[in-house]
Amino acid sequence: MKQMPRHVIQKYLKRTMEVDAFTASLDALSSETNPLRYAFFSLGIRELVNHVIDRLAPNSSVMLCGWWDDNNGKRTTPKRTEKMQYAIRGGLSDEFVTDVLKLDLSFIIDRTQQAVDELSIYVHYNKSTFNVDHVTGNKLVEDTLSAVHRFFEDIEELKEMVSEALEVSLHKAISSATIEDVLVEVDMLSTHYIVEGSDIEEIIVRSIDHQHIDVQVSGNVDIEHQYGSDGDYERGDGVRFESSYPYVVNLQLDVNEPLEITIETDDIIVNTDSFYGDEEEEDLEHWSVDEMEETNGDADREVFDPTEHFYNMEIIQGHIRM
């Protein structure tokens, strides 16, 4: 039997129980003298798929989505196609998906239906699996694993399609000007500073559920620092210098109004390690939020000495006078 490598399906499993259930389903096939081994395999895979779908789309969450239709109270449980749709778009409305994200909702619905129909043929295998011959049984296993893989793959591909379209729309709604307005309120380590500009490097949709969209925005901000007053600087007693710092903004948006965006000062994290010379050669743009929060602490950090800049400036001015 040409069996699909475990990692192909296992990468979609997020919990220990899911991995264990998948392993146990495959292990059942090793008992070649057991006439029920294909039945045990089919049962195990069916329960595994049901568990993953329930994790991705809990019934209670699906039923709270504005797009879910309970047929005037006659329905109390979502269909599998509806659960699959929730896993793909959460609570985003039909109108938002179609009109704003410019995605073909009918295509998404049709593709989810096809994936569910194909999966049901195998995980709800309705023929007797008792003591079937090796050829029939092995074909069942191969087709079942392929169907499960395509099912999970369809969810991921469609989910990514929705997320990418949403990220584009959010990029338009979150301008660098908006970021700069917030950064002006952030303490930037010097007597005076000017936010000279900022850019948005990346917007990532981390999750979508029936209520919220969790989004992470990352980029860089360019700052001009000034030590001393403007008069001090004019007399040669002040220092100005420019620096660039990576920032991260964590946002939780209303799924019903995804483009209604308000950024508060507390939402933004600026990594200022380069100011203290702590960054070395690390790529700060790819730091996680936890890493940025941790390194922005005051522990074990050298105190910044602006006189170094005065000293360097005096050397430069001395060379100029000469």
Image (tube, rainbow, N blue to C red):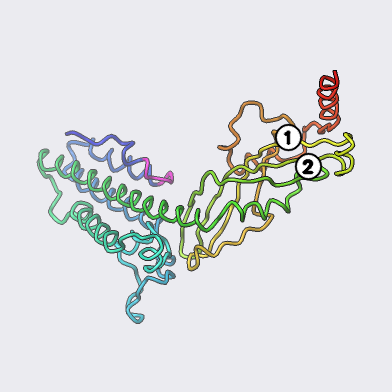
Dominant SS type (magenta):
loop
* Residue 58 figure quarter: bottom left
Mark 2 vs 1: CB contact within 8 A: yes
Between 292 and 22, which is closer to the camera in this rendering?
292
Q: x%, y% of residue 309?
A: 81, 29
Q: Residues within 10 Å of mark 1 (few under 14, many from 20)?
A: some
Q: Residue at x 24, y 54 (%)?
A: 115
The magenta span reads: 11-17
* Residue 220 figure quarter: top right
Question: Which residue is the extreme one toward the bottom?
Answer: 72
**10 relative to 143 in the view: left or right:** right
Between 131 and 149, which is closer to the camera in this rendering?
149
Image height check: is 322 above or below 98? Answer: above
Q: Amino acid at mark 2?
A: Leu
Instruction: Provide the secondary structure element on which disc 2 rests.
Output: loop
Write down the residue under mark 2.
189
Q: Residue at x 12, y 38 (%)?
A: 134
Q: x%, y% of residue 314?
A: 85, 25
Mark identifier at residue 309: none
Between 90 and 121, which is closer to the camera in this rendering?
90
Image height check: is 117 above or below 298? Answer: below
- Give the mark nearest the N terminus, 2 or 1: 2
Instruction: Provide the secondary structure element on which disc 1 rests.
Output: helix
Q: Residue at x 19, y 42 (%)?
A: 141
**170 relative to 243 in the view: left or right:** left
Mark identifier at residue 275: 1
Q: Amino acid at mark 1?
A: Phe
Q: Residues within 10 Å of mark 2 (few under 14, many from 20)?
A: few
Q: x%, y% of residue 197?
A: 64, 46
